[in-house]
């Protein structure tokens, strides 16, 4: 988002390793519970489980290409020429990115 000019600064916070209390976890738990109880043979079956997993319809399953097929992209290969590896990134829980100029960004660990 900094690259396309929407923001000058971004702060990213990740959960602490092995700490699993996260709001969406409950919704995945609802899906998992239904998944165990129902017969699942097709992608349409999975979609029904996701739709039935909450009373307020907050979980959504998305079929791509009008439900004919799922599309998968290899973003790692696509983005690799545009970015550098950040050694030790998996050990950082909070970091920020700030645009220095159009080609360089400052990484700040907290």
Image (tube, helix red, strand yellow):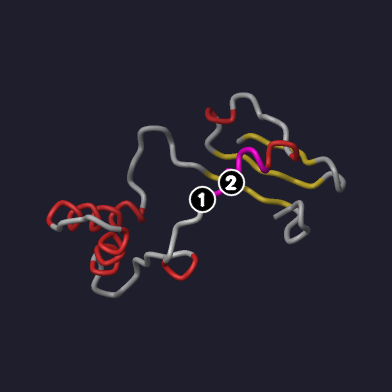
Compared with 88, 58 (above or below) is below
Mark 1 residue element: loop
Say the numbered circle drawn on residue 72.
1
Percent across and percent down for residue 63 are: 42, 65
Compared with 5, 81 (above or below) is above
In the picture provided, is 68 more to the left or to the right than 21? right
Q: Which residue corresponds to mark 2?
A: 12
Instruction: Tell which tag, 1 or 2, sits nearer the viewer.
Output: 1
Percent across and percent down for residue 103 are: 85, 43
In the picture provided, is 74 more to the left or to the right than 83? left
Residue placed furthest toward the front: 68
Say whether residue 37 is magenta.
Answer: no
Q: Residue at x 69, y 36 (%)?
A: 80
Q: Quadrant of the N terminus?
A: bottom right
Q: Residue at x 28, y 55 (%)?
A: 26
Q: Quadrant of the C terminus?
A: top right
Q: Please give the range of residues in magenta.
A: 73-78
Compared with 53, 97 (above or below) is above
User: 77 or 33: which is nearer to us?
Assistant: 77
Sequence-first tag of 1 and 2: 2
């Amino acid at each position: 988002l900094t690259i396309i000019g929407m923001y000058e600064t971004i702060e990213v916070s990740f959960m602490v390793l092995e700490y699993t209390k996260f709001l969406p976890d409950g919704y995945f738990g609802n899906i998992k519970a239904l998944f165990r109880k129902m017969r699942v043979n097709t992608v349409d079956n999975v979609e029904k489980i996701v739709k039935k997993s909450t009373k307020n319809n907050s979980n959504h399953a998305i079929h791509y290409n009008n439900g004919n097929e799922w599309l998968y992209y290899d973003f790692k290969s696509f983005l690799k020429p545009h970015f550098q590896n950040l050694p030790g990134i998996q050990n950082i829980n909070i970091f920020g990115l700030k645009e220095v100029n159009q080609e360089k960004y400052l990484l700040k660990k907290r």
